[in-house]
Structures are given as C-alpha cells and as structure tokens.
Amino acid sequence: FISYFIGDKNEWRKGYGSLAIKMILKEAKIKKLKKIKASLYANNKSSIRALIKNNFKLEGECKKDVIYKQKRISSLVYGKIL
C-alpha cells in the first residue's frame, strides 16, 4: 500500500499528490514490484483523481468503514498492476 499526505492546505490542488504517486510508481518499477495499492476515504476526491490520473483502478469499497467528523463513511481501495 502507498500513502501520501499533504498537510498544508495552501499546497492542495497543485498536483503534488499526483507527482508523489508518479515517483512512487517509478521506484516500484525499479524494485520490480508487481502491484501497488492505495486505501483512502471515499470523500477524498482529490486523491481519487490523482490515482485515476496514474491509471489506478477501483478494486473495492468498505462501506461505512471509518469514522470521519463523527460520521461513518466508506473507504476505497485502488490498485495498479505494474
């Protein structure tokens, strides 16, 4: 699984997430990994776009899996075969 976090909201929506994913994929290919996965909250639209932009596919949804702001929301798993 990969993970990335951009803590400064002033830096959101500048393409850093997508760039981080590209860099992770490049390193994964060097290491000869076969598959990469990412798990995220279903309401994280920016991460969904960044993963799709990098050709990840939705592999599953865990309904009402996590608590976010005192509400249960789903988590998603995206994957990419290298």
Image: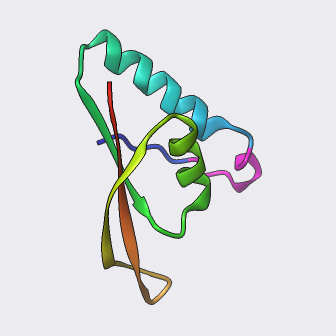
* Residue 64 sits in quarter: bottom left
Quarter of the C terminus within the rendering? top left
Q: State the image coordinates of residue 2 (x, y, percent, origin top left).
A: 35, 40
Residue 40 position in % (x across, y down) = 41, 59
Viewed as shown, does residue 57 lie left or right of 31? right
Q: Is residue 74 above or below residue 47?
A: below
Q: How is the image coloured?
A: rainbow
Point 32% across, 10% down: residue: 30
Q: Which quarter of the rendered picture does the N terminus lie within?
A: top left
What residue span does the magenta drawing correspond to?
6-13
In the image, 32 versus 58, the foreground residue is 58
Pick the residue in front: 65 or 3: 65
24 in magenta: no
* Figure check: 71 above or below 62: below
Q: Main secondary structure of the magenta part?
A: loop
The location of residue 41, given as percent across then percent down, is 44, 66
Q: Residue furthest bottom?
A: 70
Is 7 a magenta residue? yes
Residue 56 or 6: which is nearer the viewer?
56
